[in-house]
Image (tube, grey):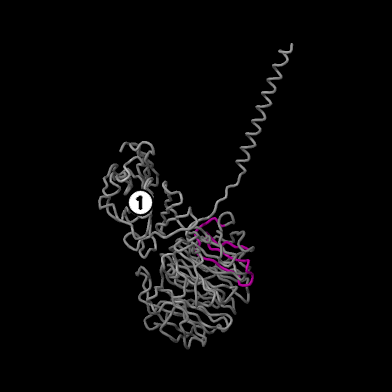
C-alpha cells in the first residue's frame, strides 16, 4: 500500500518541479523581453544636406534637413535631438522653418504641409496641407498672430507660387495672393512695424530657378509689385539678398550679383553690389561694390554683410563686413583665420542650393548670434560675425570627431575589422569613407584629395561598399558610385587609396558595389567579388585584375560562404518600365 500511495506523490513532485521550471522560464523570458538595450549615437556628424536654420525667442535652435527631418537643440547647440514621426512630423524632408517672434515655444516646420508646436518642439501637429512645396514661414512682430508662408503648387521643382496667410498664430491658413507670376520664392520678410507689408525674394532654390527679384505687398499679401525689375543694377541684375531696417521701414538694402539659371552654381564670378533705398524700394542707390547676405541688428541698425560665396582663404571678398553708419562705410571684421574648420580643414559655411539668401539664420533670442550652414554642416557666430564655430560635431584628439546629434548621414555600408574589433569603417553617401580606431568613440576622415574618387579636398563623395581583410589588419577595400574599386594598405589612411579596377570593370562612372571576400582564399591573393551594371566580377589576386563571372543578371550584392569559398551568392532586382519588381537570387560555384 505504501508503494501504491507513493507513486502519485512522486508524480506530483515531478509536476511541481515542472511547473516551477516553466514558471522560471516564463519569468526569464519576460525579463528578456522587458530588458532595455542601451544604444548610443555615434558618427562624425554632419551629412547632406541642410535647408534652413534659426533660433526662437527662447533660444531653441532648429536646423532643417532634406533627409532626416528637423534637428533641435535646447542647450545652445551643445546637443541635438531629431523631430520626427514620434513627435508628430512624419515627413523627413524639411523645406522651411518659422518662429513666432514673441513666444519662443511656438515654432513651425514646413514638411508635407505646415506643422506647429506650442511646447518648444516636444510635440507637433499639422495645421495645413498646402498640397505644395512650402519654402518659408515668417511671422510679424507688432501683430505676432499674423504670419505668411510661401508655397509652390505641385512638387519641389514647381514655380506655381502661392502665398498663405494666418491671423491666428498658424492655426488656420488662407491662400491670399492674386497676381504673382510663375516664380520660385526663397524667402519671406514681414515688416516688423506693419504686418500687412510683406516682401518676397525669388530666385534659385534646389533644382527650380526663376529671375531673382524682390516683390512687395502692402495689403497683407493679396497684390504684389516687383520693386527691382526696372533697375539694371549696373548689369548685376539678380538679387542675392534683401533686408528691411527694423527701426525704419522705409530704409532697405539689397545685394545683387551676375547669375544665370543655366549655370550649375547659379552665380557668375565673385563680384557683387550693395544697394540702399530710403523710400520703401521706389529707388535704389549703390553704396559699395561688395555684397553678401544682409543682417541688420534690431538694436542699433548696424549692417552685417556675410559673404559666403567661395568661402576660401584666398578669396578676399569672402568674410564678414560691418557698417555702423547706415552703409556709408564698411569694415572687414572677420576672414576665415578665426573660423573653426571641419574635419577636412575647410570651412563649413559655404551655403547650399536652397537659395543664397537662406544661408544665414537669425537668433531671435540674441542679436549677436546668427547661424550658417553648408551642404553638410551647420555653424554659428556668437559675437556678430567675428568668430564662428561648428555645431554638428566636437573634436576628439588630434584627428577624431564625434557628433553632437546632427547626424544627417546616409550609411551605405559598415564593417568591423575581423582582425581588430576596435577598427570600424563607414562607407557613406556624400561624406565618403570614415574610420574609428576606438570602437566608435570618435571618427577620422579617410577621404582622398583626388576629385576622381569623390568630391575632392577630402570632402567625401559617394561610396557604396567597404570591406576589411579578415587577416591583414592594414588592408581595406572600398567601391564608389563613380566606378572605382579602391584598395588601401594603411588602414584607410587618406593618402593611401589606389585604384585597382584596372579598366576591366566597365566604364568608370558606373557604380560599383556589393563587395565580398572569400575568407578561405590566400592571404596575399584574396578572391574578391563586386557588382557593376548588374553583373558580377571576380578577382583572384587581391583586386589587381577582374573578370566577369555572371553577366547581366541585375545583381546588386554578393556574398561568399564563410567555410566553403566555392559557394557564392549574388542577388538583386530589376524594375521594369511598367513598375514590376523582379528579384533573382543565383547560387553558384566560383
Observer-nearest of 460 and 82: 460
Residue 11: name its quadrant.
top right
Which of 571/14 is in front?
14
The picture places residue 35, in percent across and down from the top left corner, at: 61, 44
Query: Considering depth in this image, is 396 or 67 the residue closer to the camera?
Result: 396
Q: Which residues are magenta?
A: 89-117
In this view, the residue farthest toward the top is 1
Can see residue 81?
yes
Residue 111: in magenta span = yes
Quadrant placement of the C terminus:
top left
Residue that numbered label 1 is attached to:
477
- Give the vertical position of 9 relative to 589 (above or below): above
Residue for point 69% across, 23% down: 13
Q: How many marks?
A: 1
Name the image quarter holding residue 363: bottom right
* Percent x, y of residue 56: 59, 69
Amino acid at each position: 500500500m505504501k508503494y501504491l500511495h507513493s507513486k502519485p506523490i512522486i508524480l506530483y513532485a515531478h509536476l511541481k518541479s515542472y511547473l516551477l521550471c516553466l514558471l522560471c522560464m516564463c519569468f526569464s523570458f519576460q525579463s528578456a523581453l522587458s530588458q532595455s538595450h542601451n544604444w548610443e549615437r555615434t558618427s562624425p556628424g554632419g551629412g547632406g544636406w541642410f535647408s534652413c536654420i534659426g533660433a526662437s525667442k527662447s533660444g531653441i535652435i532648429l536646423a532643417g534637413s532634406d533627409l532626416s527631418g528637423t534637428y533641435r537643440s535646447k542647450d545652445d547647440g551643445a546637443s541635438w535631438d531629431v523631430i520626427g514621426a514620434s513627435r508628430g512630423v512624419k515627413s523627413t524632408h524639411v523645406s522651411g522653418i518659422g518662429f513666432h517672434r514673441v513666444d519662443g515655444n511656438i515654432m513651425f516646420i514646413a514638411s508635407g504641409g505646415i506643422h506647429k508646436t506650442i511646447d518648444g518642439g516636444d510635440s507637433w501637429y499639422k495645421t495645413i496641407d498646402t498640397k505644395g512645396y512650402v519654402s518659408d514661414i515668417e511671422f510679424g512682430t507688432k501683430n505676432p498672430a499674423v504670419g505668411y508662408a510661401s508655397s509652390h503648387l505641385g512638387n519641389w521643382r514647381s514655380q506655381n507660387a502661392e502665398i498663405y496667410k494666418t491671423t491666428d498664430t498658424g492655426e488656420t491658413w488662407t491662400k491670399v495672393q492674386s497676381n504673382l507670376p510663375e516664380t520660385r520664392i526663397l524667402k519671406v520678410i514681414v515688416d516688423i512695424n506693419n504686418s500687412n507689408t510683406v516682401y518676397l525674394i525669388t530666385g534659385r532654390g534646389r533644382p527650380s530657378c526663376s529671375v531673382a527679384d524682390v516683390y512687395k505687398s502692402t495689403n497683407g499679401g493679396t497684390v504684389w509689385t516687383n520693386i527691382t525689375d526696372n533697375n539694371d543694377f549696373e548689369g548685376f541684375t539678380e538679387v542675392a539678398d534683401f533686408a528691411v531696417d527694423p527701426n525704419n521701414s522705409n530704409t532697405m538694402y539689397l545685394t545683387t550679383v551676375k547669375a544665370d539659371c543655366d549655370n550649375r552654381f547659379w552665380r557668375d564670378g565673385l563680384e557683387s553690389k550693395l544697394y540702399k533705398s530710403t523710400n520703401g524700394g521706389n529707388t535704389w542707390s549703390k553704396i559699395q561694390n561688395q555684397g553678401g547676405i544682409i543682417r541688420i541688428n534690431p538694436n542699433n541698425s548696424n549692417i552685417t554683410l556675410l559673404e559666403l560665396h567661395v568661402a576660401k582663404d584666398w578669396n578676399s571678398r569672402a568674410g564678414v563686413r560691418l557698417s555702423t553708419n547706415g552703409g556709408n562705410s564698411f569694415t572687414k571684421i572677420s576672414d576665415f583665420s578665426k573660423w573653426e574648420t571641419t574635419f577636412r580643414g575647410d570651412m563649413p559655411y559655404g551655403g547650399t542650393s536652397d537659395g543664397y539668401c537662406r544661408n544665414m539664420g537669425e537668433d531671435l533670442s540674441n542679436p549677436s548670434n546668427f547661424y550658417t550652414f553648408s551642404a553638410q554642416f551647420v555653424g554659428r557666430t556668437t559675437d556678430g560675425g567675428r568668430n564662428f564655430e561648428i555645431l554638428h560635431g566636437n573634436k576628439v584628439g588630434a584627428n577624431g570627431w564625434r557628433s553632437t546629434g546632427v547626424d544627417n548621414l546616409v550609411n551605405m555600408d559598415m564593417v568591423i575589422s575581423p582582425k581588430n574589433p576596435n577598427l570600424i569603417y563607414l562607407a557613406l553617401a556624400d561624406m565618403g569613407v570614415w574610420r574609428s580606431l576606438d570602437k566608435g568613440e570618435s571618427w577620422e576622415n579617410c577621404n582622398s584629395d583626388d576629385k576622381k574618387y569623390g568630391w575632392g579636398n577630402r570632402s567625401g563623395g559617394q561610396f557604396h561598399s567597404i570591406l576589411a581583410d579578415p587577416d591583414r589588419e592594414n588592408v581595406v577595400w572600398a567601391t564608389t558610385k563613380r566606378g572605382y574599386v579602391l584598395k588601401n594598405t594603411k588602414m584607410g589612411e587618406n593618402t593611401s587609396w589606389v585604384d585597382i579596377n584596372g579598366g576591366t570593370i566597365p566604364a568608370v562612372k558606373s557604380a560599383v558595389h556589393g563587395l565580398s571576400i572569400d575568407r578561405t582564399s590566400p592571404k596575399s591573393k584574396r578572391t574578391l567579388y563586386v557588382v557593376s551594371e548588374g553583373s558580377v566580377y571576380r578577382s583572384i589576386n587581391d583586386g589587381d585584375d577582374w573578370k566577369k563571372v555572371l553577366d547581366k543578371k541585375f545583381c546588386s550584392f554578393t556574398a561568399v560562404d564563410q567555410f566553403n569559398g566555392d559557394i557564392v551568392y549574388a542577388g538583386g532586382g530589376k524594375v521594369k518600365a511598367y513598375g514590376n519588381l523582379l528579384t533573382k537570387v543565383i547560387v553558384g560555384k566560383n
